[in-house]
Image (cartoon, coloured by chain):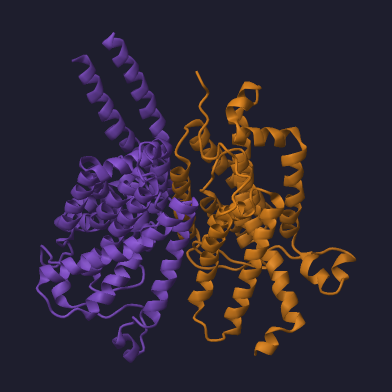
Chain colours: A purple, B orange
Amino acid sequence: MKIRKNAFFISIITNILIPLGAVFLALIVGSIFLITAHVNPLNAYYLMFAASFGSLYGITETLVKATPLIIVGAGVCVAFRSGMVNIGGEGQIIVGAILTTFVALKLPSLPKIISVMILLLVGFVGGGIYGLIPGVLKAYLNINEILTTVMLNSIATQVLYLLLRGPMMDPLEKAFGTGYPQSSIITQSAWLTRFFQGKRLHTGIFIAIILAIAMYYLLWKTTIGYKMRAVGKNKNASRYGGINVERYMILSMLIAGGMAGIAGAVEVMGIHHRLLDGISAGYGFSGIVAALFGKLNPLGTIPASILFGSILFGADSLQRTVGIPAAMVYAIEGLVVVFAVSGEIISRKIASRNTEILTEDEK
Amino acid sequence: MMGNFFQTGVIVSIFSAGIRLATPYLLASIGEMLDQRSGVYNLGIEGIMLIGAFLSFYTSLKTGSLMLGILMAIIVGLLMGLLSAFINVTMKAEQGISGIGIYMFGFGLSGLLFRLTMGAIVTIDGFKSIPIPILSKMPYIGEIFFNQNWMVYLAFLLVPISYIVLFKTTFGLKIRSVGENPSAADSLGVSVEFIRYVCIIIGSVLAALAGAFLTIGQQKAIFVENISAGRGFIAIALVYFGRWQPTGVMIGSLLFSILDALQIRVQIANIGIPYEYAVMAPYIITIIVLVFVAQHRIGGSTALGKPFERCK
């Protein structure tokens, strides 16, 4: 009985207190920057959270931002759990969004459900292929996937510019000579339904939650997921155990990339209804933060994404009202990552102490 | 126009720019090489470069002294190095992920400070070239190698210095032993943690100086957001390319910087290629280089990326 109580407290400490402590510490460090900028940090943070949760508009916008974070984050969980540090979310979102828009612009008018399903698949394929490249390079040539994904992010950004200033630019932009880098609007049957008049929250949030549950199921309730996690824990042991290590490394990158691609598709179908410059909006990085914050559990990614969605939206409104640049979010997110991975050692120490208690009790 | 392109004057200026542009790669990758020789990845150097680039620029702008800007970069490097070392060595964090955290922090902080303090692009005069007497008078060679600013000379001097430190001193032996077999080094009384702290801090100072070179190391110094544009990550790739050897790292840096110089020329020449291709080129080449060096990978520390746990 005592043991179970211990285990419960330990899970609270490692799963909730340490991540929250990381955010708390990051906000404290963030307040130093705010003070140097002559802004009262308490006031700024209050404004941030009031903006995110104080009105229906704030809540819907928080969820709008959380939607891509959940999808990217759930994919990141699969990759990280398989030992692949996928930093390529930005590029994978972009490629998914490009391919989705390309197909959507050619799509005949179909029932909404069918168009949406097709385009989600297209997004998955686009992002998945882009995730496959670093996956294959890592699995067969042992090339550091962090470097390749970072490079692929920059390449995707340039490809996006090229397409939006060239073949995919809206003919209207060309005709009026405004030249704004965006594509034409996609067919209305591919738009995700919005819940409220005048607010951007759309059915993508359900897609995100379903996908997160699916990723949880994949990782913990299927043989494939078991093998992926085994590969992530110990490659050599998995190989001796008869697992085709390379296959599962690549598969995890395909899934993670595909998920980011879906996030790109959802952004196109739910928010912008077209492809435009800056479509990935940093979600590729924030998704990693959300995944780490959710302890690399796709279900934990959901509340984590809502928290970071609120921080993203809060920072946006802070920029409008008090003039604090929204770039602060990256600094805070970076600190959250740093503190969260540093906090791991505390969880490990507590866990190892607990196993010692267990063995003593067993005696 | 192509004829114009191949005139000797143009070629000399491309190579001269190539030597100059090698500086940030060289500074950052020599530092990263030290980190990795001691067994630690520091994937956050891009972020450290960005903070170094901004704060050295801003300090120079406000004080009017470029040397104070350099001092600021060194302070940034020391502090960020201490932070990285604390996370990676003392807290034994997963190095890939903590590095991304440091990168995001540096990216966000430099952007935040830039917008808070300046918000617009300001130009100041950076370091001027110091022609080396006699040598700089040599035809072509003088212009290419001996008419650069002091940061360029420093970066190239670091190649022999880092070679001597790594392979001819006790300290270098300790660095390599800590990277190859930390347990053995530990049993012989070498402090694994101390050596790794020192290497990470030196690496971060060099990364911050690389950042400073991108701003005040230019004749017309400016700061724009994300000014390093992935050079920190490319520098890490160059360490693999150079197989953890100072000369190899230098060759890699030169390869990239000459490509950079060529790419800038092509953009200026405006021969009808969209500039996105030119911007993309270094990233694509980095991946190709990584593929190329992957087949014959030798020289990396055995304990690279593994936090040291003393056996109980």
Residue at the image point whose x is 45% and y is 36% from the top: B93
Question: In the image shown, does A28 or B245 lie closer to the viewer?
Answer: B245
| Residue located at (35% from left, 40% from top) | A242
Look at the picture and state if A345 lies above or below B25.
Answer: above
* Quadrant (top left/top right/bottom left/bottom right) for the C terminus of chain A: top left
Q: Horizontal placement of A25 versus A116: left or right?
A: right
Between residue B265 and residue B249, name the one nearer to us.
B249
Total residue callouts: 0
Q: Going 47% across and 33% down the picture, which residue do you hit? A: B92
Hey, which quadrant is residue B222 in on the image? bottom right
Residue B29 appears at what percent x and percent y?
Answer: 62, 52
Which sits in the foreground, B264 or A58? B264
Q: Can residue B227 be seen in this snapshot?
A: no
Judge by depth and name the residue closer to the eye, B233 or B206. B233
**Residue placed at 48% from the left, 46% from the top?**
B99
* Residue A329 percent across, percent down from the top left: 37, 52
Looking at the rendering, which quadrant does residue A136 occupy? Answer: bottom left
Q: Is residue B259 visible?
A: yes
**In the current view of this chain or complex, which residue is farthest to the right?**
B134
Residue B218 vertical position relative to residue B238 in the rendered view, above or below:
below
Residue A339 percent coordinates (x, y): 41, 38
Which quadrant holds the N terminus of chain A? top left
- x and y percent of residue B145 in the render? 78, 66
